[in-house]
Image (cartoon, rainbow, N blue to C red):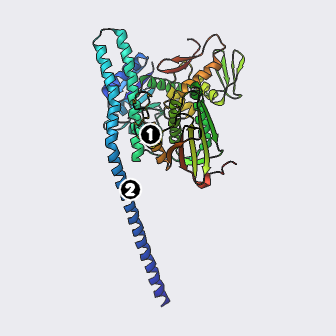
Amino acid sequence: MFGVWLSLVLLLCLLGGVAGFWWLQRRRQQQKEALLRRQLVSVTQSSRQTGDNIAHDLRTPLTRLRADVEDALRHDDSEMHRATLERVLDEIQNMQNIVNALLALSQAEAGVMRVRKKTVDLSGLLEELIELYIPSAEERQLTLQGRIAPNLNIEADRQLLARIFANLFDNELKYVPAGGTILLTALASGPHVEIRVEDDGPGIPVEMRDKIFERFARLDPSRTLSGGSGLGLSLVKAFAQLLQGEVRVVESSLGGAAFILTLPASAAELSKPSP
Amino acid sequence: MVKLLIIEDDEAAAGSLKRGLVEAGYAVELAHDGERGLQQAQAGDHDLWVIDIMLPGRDGLSVLKTLRDQGRRTPALILSALGKVDDRVEGLRVGGDDYVVKPYAFDELLARIEALLRRVRSFGSGPETMLELADLKMDLLSRNVTRGGQEIDLQPREFRLLEYLMRHAGQVVTRTMLLENVWEYFFDPQTNVVDVHISRLRQKIDKSFATPLLHTVRGRGYILRPEA
């Protein structure tokens, strides 16, 4: 009798387990589908606007290229031809940079860029990047400083992390006027690490703070003034998301802009913040 | 004469590449698809292969993997389509020795070919402990650097930068090569970070000496050599 009851209970447990598993799977599937739908809607909305911007940003150099080459062809001057070819090559390089950045961006946003996560010594990496950029900052009469908590280890892709900070530094070096200060702070905050890159430059108006992460967004409406692909901050955002992090910009206590990047750190790997 | 095999299906691109490499003093053989490339590589005694990944029929990675599986150790430089990030890792995994993204600058490719050939030539000569160029001496064990007997104080990164330049003395090295080999970053920042580090190094090794050793090659990169 007991045996029969036991079999019955076991059978019920098994059925319950199967049903529970099926229900969980279905819910996961539904959540996935909803997420995909949301992503699709947002991609379609943004892609039209992006397409316009890409067309604009590639048409400008194309126009210049065409005029330059036509002008050279009207003349029979080998010195002038050489100068034209050199300008053409520079312009091709600029366009190549834009295309490369766009490609990286779409791969990152579509989630097809492979992320190679390993334990990264974030403190060491940030010190290295500061060391890499200090001479360039000094050349522009800028002070670049780091206040980095020791032994910050995170699970992330070293190359992606480095590209995020290189893009942020490139941006700072371009926009902070000579005599300015750029400060990088990194510390552990609960299950995250928070890294701030801030400056005492002109800052970013409140209404522009979300827009600057969009493709080809520039504070300067004339667009061509600053050079660059206009995609650096979009890349920062896309790479941060690939690493399950996020980036935002606020006003810095130094008076300029503060980019705040939050990244998850596996708790076991994370040391206590320094006192 | 150093013999190169280029396996590249874009005939126009392969043609320009061949012209440039012949002018640089190499003997160049071309193959326009994977199957023929594989046969030519097996039949020839090339010093280096340049292999495009995207090939009709049999792709470049499979060609290289087959050659490596057959025990052929000829150095291989891989060309990949623009921006396929994983190709670099994949290419090096199947036995590629270096990797260049298309569209590449000819000078970048040439510099890397020269670096690869040099690496192969110096292979087996045992680990070096002392690097020398004219009166510049670098002791890799004591990490002591002197020029004309005078001690030069270098930061750790400057030491690595100079070591790389010394190991490639007489040969143009590009900014990208320096970023990859000295800093281990596989992307190019928009800021001229490498140039400024080079000019700091130049201050230390050249400034108070009559003959400069570290030269800028316009549009290409840098070269360390005793004559201008």
Crowding at label 1, few (<14), some or many (≥20) Cα neighbours within 10 Å? many
**Circles 2, 1 touching at the beta carbon (< 8 Å):** no
Residue A27 x %, y %: 39, 65
Q: Is residue B36 something that shows in the picture?
A: no
Which numbered disc flags the more N-terminal residue, 2 or 1?
Answer: 2
Q: What's the chain of the residue with tag 1?
A: A
Q: Secondary structure at mark 1?
A: helix
Residue A75 x %, y %: 29, 10
Q: Is residue A201 something that shows in the picture?
A: yes
Q: Which mark is residue A35?
A: 2
What residue sits 42% from the left and 39% below the top? A104
> Relative to B13, is A41 above or below?
below
What residue sits 62% from the left and 40% below the top? A124
* Viewer-nearest of discs 2 and 1: 1
Write down the residue under mark 1.
Answer: A212
* Amino acid type, callout 2: Leu
* Amino acid type, callout 1: Ile
What residue sits 38% from the left and 14% below the top? A83
Q: Residue lying furthest bottom in this view?
A: A1
What residue sits 46% from the left and 78% below the top? A13
Q: Is residue B185 left or right of residue A55?
A: right
Q: Secondary structure at mark 2?
A: helix
Q: Nearer the viewer, residue B130 or A116?
A: A116
> Relative to B19, is A164 above or below?
below
> Relative to A136, is A129 above or below?
below
